[in-house]
Amino acid sequence: MAEKDLTEKTLESYNDVFADIVNVLLYKGKKVIKPESLTDAGSLSTYKMDGKLHEQERDVAKFCKEGNIRIALYGLENQTKTDKDMPFRVIGYDGAVYRNQLNEGKNRYPVITLVLYFGEGHWAAPKRLKECLNIPDELKKYVNDYKIHVFEIPYLSRKQVQMFESDFKIVADYFVQKRMTNSYKPSKDTIKHVDAVLKLLKVVEDDPRYELKLTDMSEINEGGRNMSEILNKLLAEGEARGRAEGEARGRARGRAEGYNAVAEEMIKEKTPISMIQKFTKLSLEQLEKLSKECGVALVM
């Protein structure tokens, strides 16, 4: 799971991808946020517990200065499973940023956190802080609430998927197709960040055929190929490698079975161990196992 989180962060850390996600999910496809208006924000913050400082880390966070949005901080949190404690986590991230603003005495700016959910089924955990708490009825009106914003990527509509203009369109399309048909037909959309997209698919599918080799990188310039062409090429190479590896394993297994058969006959003929090992290269443990199977004691 850690590898998957890392690959998601790698793709989303590109400004064009990050801006695209925010524009589609928050601004309904309007190009409000431009990639050049984004700068990386520190993902680490601290909190004190048991007299010690502890670190908490956002997945991806960026500052934005754009038009009437003088400054804002957008954060993305990736989830492949529902998390009942997500409201606590988000309020911790957001609160740490607001606290820093208070301490530093700088201009106050809004903090928006988007939870991107890639899991199977709908989000089945609280989206509000009050839903996580056991609050007596007489105190409910005094307890402030905090809402998290969860976007279920596999349940985006086709219209929403088509709004994306970055490589995230390929990722969203993948999850939507897998949910609807349990299969994936790659699009002909051109990929800009080839390596990041394929690494994500490799981890999600747990399929090494999606891994981009150095030789592939020399042939595929960033932004020069579409998803269908690249996957067809990689899958064909993967299948060829699989056949070659299968044949090699078959030959090795055949040799091993041959050595075992020879050793078994030599054991039955009461041939000394040293002589059997000279001809078959089998270990003492292997010969002892064969000896038990054929019911004949080894001769030293």
Image (tube, rainbow, N blue to C red):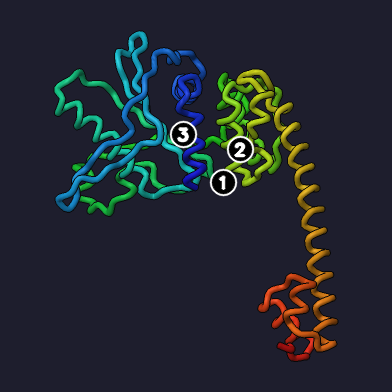
- For the residue labelled by badge 3, is the local secondary structure a helix, a strand or a loop? helix
Give the residue displayed 62% in from the left and 23% down from the top: 191
User: For mark 2, what is the residue?
Assistant: 201
Of the residues shown, which amino acid type is indicated by label 1? Glu
* Residue lying at 19% horizontally and 32% vertically, measured from the top left: 99
Q: Residue tagged by mark 1?
A: 120
Mark 3 belongs to which amino acid?
Lys
Give x and y (percent) for residue 205: 63, 44
Amino acid found under the numbered disc labelled 2: Leu
Whole-percent x and y of residue 56? Answer: 30, 41
Image depth: mark 3 or mark 1 in front = 3
Q: Is residue 260 above or below residue 21?
A: below
Q: Measuring 37% from the left and 44% from the top, which residue is drawn there?
A: 86
* Contact flag, marks 3 and 1 (Cβ < 8 Å): no
Q: Is residue 201 above or below residue 226?
A: below
Instruction: Looking at the image, tell me whether mark 3 or mark 1 is earlier in sequence order.
Output: 3
Residue 199: x %, y % from top left: 58, 36
Q: Nearer the viewer, residue 206 or 260?
A: 260
Q: What's the CA distance linking mark 1 and mark 2?
A: 16 Å
Q: Is residue 157 visible?
A: no
What residue is at 48 percent from the left and 32 percent from the top? 10
Residue 26 figure quarter: top left
Mark 3 highlights which residue?
9
Q: CA distance from mark 3 to mark 2?
A: 13 Å
Front disc: 1 or 2? 2
Crowding near the residue tagged with mark 2, few <14, some 14–19, many ≥20 C-alpha atoms within 10 Å: many
Report, in whole angstroms, how far the alpha carbon at label 3 lies from the one at label 1.
20 Å
